[in-house]
Amino acid sequence: MVGDQTLFIRQDNVEVSWGLLTPVLEAWENADSVPYQYPAGSETFAEADAIIEADGRSWRKLSGL
């Protein structure tokens, strides 16, 4: 790891990342709702299905590829 800068992120990238994510984290902290959770490895979840089905569409199934 010594001297291999490809293993680390630059300080300006860290600052930009926090600048983008902090408002999201604050919004979640102050909201009455929480982000949707779904089981790891699942292809979709009911809330995602409802969003896309509202426009008469459906997700393409990934299993069996």
Image (spheres, helix red, strand yellow):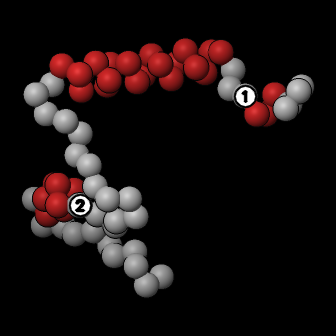
Q: Is residue 55 visible?
A: no
SS of the residue under disc 2? loop
As measured in the structure, the alpha-carbon distance from the residue carrying label 1 to the one carrying label 2 is: 34 Å
Q: Between 13 and 2, which is closer to the camera in this rendering?
A: 2
Decide: is 56 above or below 22: below
How far across and how far down the image is residue 13, in percent? Answer: 61, 21
Q: Is residue 7 visible?
A: yes
Q: Please state, as top left, top right, bottom left or bottom right, where the N terminus lies in the image.
A: top right
Q: What residue appears at the point 47 percent right and 19 percent down from the top-left corner?
A: 18
Q: Which residue is mark 2?
A: 45
Q: Residues within 10 Å of mark 2 (few under 14, many from 20)?
A: few
How far across and how far down the image is residue 39, in percent? Answer: 32, 59
Marks 1,2: beta carbons within 8 A: no
**Which of the two discs, 1 and 2, labels the residue nearer the N terminus?**
1
The amino acid on which the numbered mark 2 sits, given as a three-letter code, is: Phe
Q: What residue appears at the point 62 percent right and 15 percent down from the top-left corner?
A: 12
Q: Residues within 10 Å of mark 1 (few under 14, many from 20)?
A: few
Image position of 29 (left or right of 21)? left
The amino acid on which the numbered mark 1 sits, given as a three-letter code, is: Phe
Which label belongs to residue 8? 1
Q: What residue appears at the point 34 percent right and 76 percent down from the top-left corner?
A: 61
